[in-house]
Amino acid sequence: MKIQWLGHSAFKLTESTGVSVITDPFKPSAVGYSMAYLPCNAVTLSHSHHDHNYVAGVKGKPRIIDTTGVFDVDGIHIHGVEVNHDPEEGRLRGKSIIYKFRLDGVTVCHLGDLGEPCTPELTEQLIPVNVLLIPVGGNYTIDAEQAKEYVDNILPDIVIPMHYKTKHTELDIDKLDAFLRLFDDDQIEEYDSDTLEFDRYDFNGGSTKVIVPARYKG
């Protein structure tokens, strides 16, 4: 399976069959750089803010998934779990949805605009996870230290940070550095491409790796 980071919280997940899902497409004016106009079979929207729900940035007429529940998209299993967009039980910014995907035997978890602290109850709903897509920029989501707590409790094989400030982003969120400083140097890998490929045999339960596509490091 392939994971292509499109920027911000948008990823394209593609199974070996060619079936694909795009997560949280963003409006370019909200983020500061363009949203790739790519085709897919389905789009998942964690919530209705314009940096996460820009369906016009996706090519074709994909199936739109914007609720909790269990879904199947031509063999890709999707499970949506409701969480709070802020630490005050949604009173500030409402709710968001975490989506777990199962494709080619790999479990990918996209935390959306998660804003609530890590709890054993939520962790139990999410594990196990091979690849964790996690916001780290703070303010509108969990910050670097809170994200590290999620990583330490979920214990994914791979972490790909998202929703942080780059040189093109005007949103009031933090840069990536604060999150990376919480890991040892040998845990961090910078990837020259924006696309990663995995299969289920790549994961052996060893230490967690943080992977940063170089073009979006900021």
Image (cartoon, grey):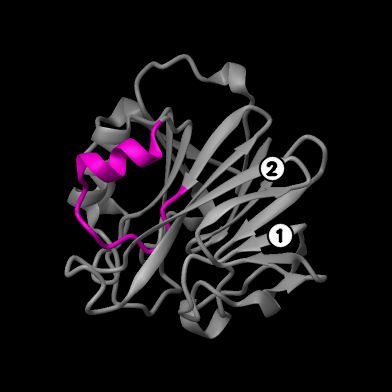
The quadrant of the picture occupied by the N terminus is top right
Question: Which residue is at 34% across, 28% downward?
Answer: 187
Determine whether 53 is above or below 211 in the image: below
Label placed on residue 42: 1
Q: Residue furthest front?
A: 69
Q: Horizontal placement of 150 versus 42: left or right?
A: left
Is residue 132 a member of the stretch shown in magenta?
A: no
Question: Which residue is at 18% across, 49% downward?
Answer: 145
Q: Secondary structure at mark 2?
A: strand
Q: State the image coordinates of residue 111 (x, y, percent, origin top left).
A: 41, 53
Res. 25 image quadrant? bottom right
Q: Secondary structure at mark 1?
A: strand
Residues at circles 1 and 2 in contact by the CB criterion of under 8 Å? yes
Is residue 114 a member of the stretch shown in magenta?
A: yes
Q: Horizontal placement of 58 versus 30: left or right?
A: right
The quadrant of the picture occupied by the C terminus is bottom left
Tell me which segment is drawn in magenta.
110-127
Q: Amino acid at mark 2?
A: Ile
Would you call the spot at circle 1 few (<14 residues within 10 Å), some (14-19), or many (20 or more)? many
Q: Amino acid at mark 1?
A: Ala
Q: Horizontal placement of 106 versus 131: left or right?
A: right
Q: State the image coordinates of residue 61 (x, y, percent, origin top left).
A: 80, 71
Q: Residue furthest bottom?
A: 29
Question: Which residue is at 69% across, 79% downward?
Answer: 56
Would you say residue 80 is visible in this rendering? yes
Res. 18 image quadrant? top right
Q: Closer to the camera, 33 or 139?
A: 139
- The residue wearing badge 2 is 76
Determine whether 104 is above or below 172 in the image: above
